[in-house]
Image (spheres, rainbow, N blue to C red):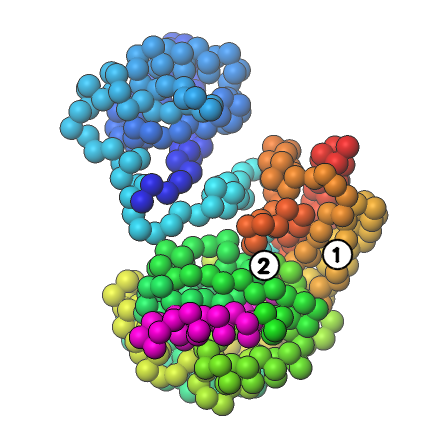
């Protein structure tokens, strides 16, 4: 209740027409009035800044201000203490539309947490023309296997079954292909123990509502990608961050956290059996790899303490120098590990396709919930993915992708050494997408850095998205920006950083 949603209306692709007899400011006024009176912009909606509106509409700021002043005088919009212009909830608009629902207020009442304000800004800014995306966790379009998928789709176009519903756990052909594919990582999983999901986020959501009672504890690395989303928090689960060290999770801290949870709860409390969420291979955001020894020690601790593990293997195959140790699931002899995989990172985020491996009762339970929410992941995507694996496209793609990612990583490292050597430090990632950069010079506010870079059309991911108390890190990605964009973006970043330091 009362959560802080970023209620800024999205920037519209609309511009006034100079050829019309109606003055430009009147056209703007009519456009905004229409948005309000139709209810698209409801009471309490925050308008984009004057600078943003003027730029998107291609008009002088003074012209825009004239239109906004007229709308303010009419009682349709209002300025508020602390800044910003909002659709009015009183005056002309509310008198003329007293019976309309206040959707802005209603949007605050849902139980599902909103994205962090910066995440909402990032999600919108990623589609802004001219933006340089230095933090984006996805492959550049030119690195995706477009030609291969075009051929697969042409082959599938002669089939009709791809347009039908698919069984609850997903396409049997795809699950059989994944069963074989997972063996290359040491995981023995029958098709019955695999659930096809619409990406890892859906798997997290299904687990949070289908397996864990409200109030349960979720242990995780700190920092962690999971802090930047709210799948578990919205389900009433409690996140407990565990510090990391060079080899991975600090097991002493993990054991202490488990002991605290056990000793602080009675036998009827669901928190007695916490779940550990971990990204052991090419961790997001740090890029680190849990050592083979630490994986052995973690599995031993899990057996001793009785905890279950949710392993996120989104980056497992994206090694650049040498393969990481085998997944935790490959070491699992008790059905203790749930294993998540996805095509979003290594192949294409647009497919929205991932998988979850676990004990059959768990998979059937989550498949039933999934059928109640979306009635199955896209049939077309599943059929295409089945061909992708069975015809050997995946192996070929990974052999082509790794050298390209390695080249981009090395280029970004070279730029960092050139421009940031005296104000920051970082480790060389052995795979994945990310460089976890820490500013060593003070004072520097990463919040101000994020905002100033965004103003300059450079998008970074500040460390506090992954650890609320982190004030010195940013996550950089070498997977999306071109070499030219990397250099231009990092030059802006270092210039802004130095200005904030001095």
264 in magenta: yes
> Which secondary structure lies at badge 2?
loop
Residue at 72% from the left image edge and 75% from the top image edge: 322
> x, y (%) of residue 5?
39, 40
Q: Is residue 313 visible?
A: no
Residue matched to label 2: 223
> x, y (%) of residue 37?
26, 24
**Stretch of the chain drawn in magenta:** 254-283
User: Which quarter shows the N terminus?
Assistant: top left
Q: Is residue 447 left or right of residue 170?
A: right
Residue 426 shows which numbered tag?
1
In front here: 113 or 378?
A: 113
Q: Is residue 325 above or below residue 496?
A: below
| Residue 208 falls in image quadrant | bottom left
Q: Is residue 67 above or below residue 290?
A: above
Residue at 46% from the left image edge and 54% from the top image edge: 229
Residue at 34% from the left image edge and 24% from the top image edge: 87
Residue at 29% from the left image edge and 44% from the top image edge: 109
């Amino acid at each position: 209740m009362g959560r802080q949603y970023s209620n800024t209306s999205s920037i519209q692709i609309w511009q006034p027409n100079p050829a019309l007899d109606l003055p430009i400011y009147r056209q703007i006024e009519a456009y905004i009035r229409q948005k309000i009176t139709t209810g698209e912009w409801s009471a309490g909606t925050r308008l984009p800044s004057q600078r943003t509106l003027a730029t998107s509409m291609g008009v002088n700021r003074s012209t825009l201000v004239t239109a906004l002043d007229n709308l303010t005088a009419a009682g349709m919009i209002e300025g508020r203490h602390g800044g910003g212009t909002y659709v009015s909830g009183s005056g002309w608009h509310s008198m003329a539309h007293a019976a309309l629902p206040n959707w802005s207020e209603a949007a605050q009442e849902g139980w599902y947490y909103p994205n962090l304000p910066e995440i909402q800004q990032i999600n919108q800014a990623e589609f802004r023309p001219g933006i340089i995306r230095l933090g984006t966790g996805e492959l550049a379009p030119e690195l995706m296997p477009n030609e291969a998928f075009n051929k697969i789709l042409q082959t599938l176009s002669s089939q009709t079954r791809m347009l039908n519903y698919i069984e609850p756990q997903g396409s049997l052909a795809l699950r059989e292909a994944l069963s074989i594919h997972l063996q290359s990582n040491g995981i023995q999983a029958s098709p019955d123990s695999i659930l096809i999901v619409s990406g890892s986020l859906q798997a997290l959501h299904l687990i949070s509502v289908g397996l864990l009672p409200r109030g349960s504890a979720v242990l995780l690395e700190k920092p962690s990608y999971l802090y930047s989303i709210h799948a578990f928090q919205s389900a009433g689960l409690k996140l407990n961050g565990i510090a990391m060290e060079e080899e991975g999770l600090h097991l002493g801290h993990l054991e202490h956290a488990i002991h605290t949870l056990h000793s602080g709860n009675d036998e009827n409390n669901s928190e007695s059996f916490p779940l550990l969420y971990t990204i052991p291979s090419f961790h997001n955001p740090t890029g680190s790899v849990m050592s083979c020894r630490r994986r052995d020690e973690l599995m031993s601790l899990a057996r001793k303490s009785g905890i279950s593990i949710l392993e996120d293997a989104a980056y497992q195959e994206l090694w650049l120098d040498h393969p990481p140790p085998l997944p935790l699931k490959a070491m699992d002899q008790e059905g203790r590990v749930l294993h998540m995989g996805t095509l979003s990172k290594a192949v294409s985020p647009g497919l929205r396709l991932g998988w979850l491996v676990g004990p059959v009762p768990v998979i059937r339970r989550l498949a039933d919930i999934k059928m109640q929410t979306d009635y199955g992941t896209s049939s077309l995507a599943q059929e295409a993915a089945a061909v992708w694996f069975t015809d050997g496209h995946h192996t070929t793609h990974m052999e082509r992708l790794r050298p390209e990612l390695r080249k981009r990583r090395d280029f970004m490292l070279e730029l960092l050494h050139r421009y940031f050597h005296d104000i920051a430090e970082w480790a060389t990632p052995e795979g994945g997408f990310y460089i976890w950069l820490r500013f060593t010079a003070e004072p520097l506010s990463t919040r101000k850095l994020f905002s100033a870079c965004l103003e300059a059309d450079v998008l970074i991911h500040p460390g506090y998205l992954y650890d609320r108390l982190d004030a010195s890190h940013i996550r950089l990605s070498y997977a999306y920006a071109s070499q030219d964009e990397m250099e231009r973006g990092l030059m802006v970043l270092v210039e802004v950083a130095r200005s904030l330091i001095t």
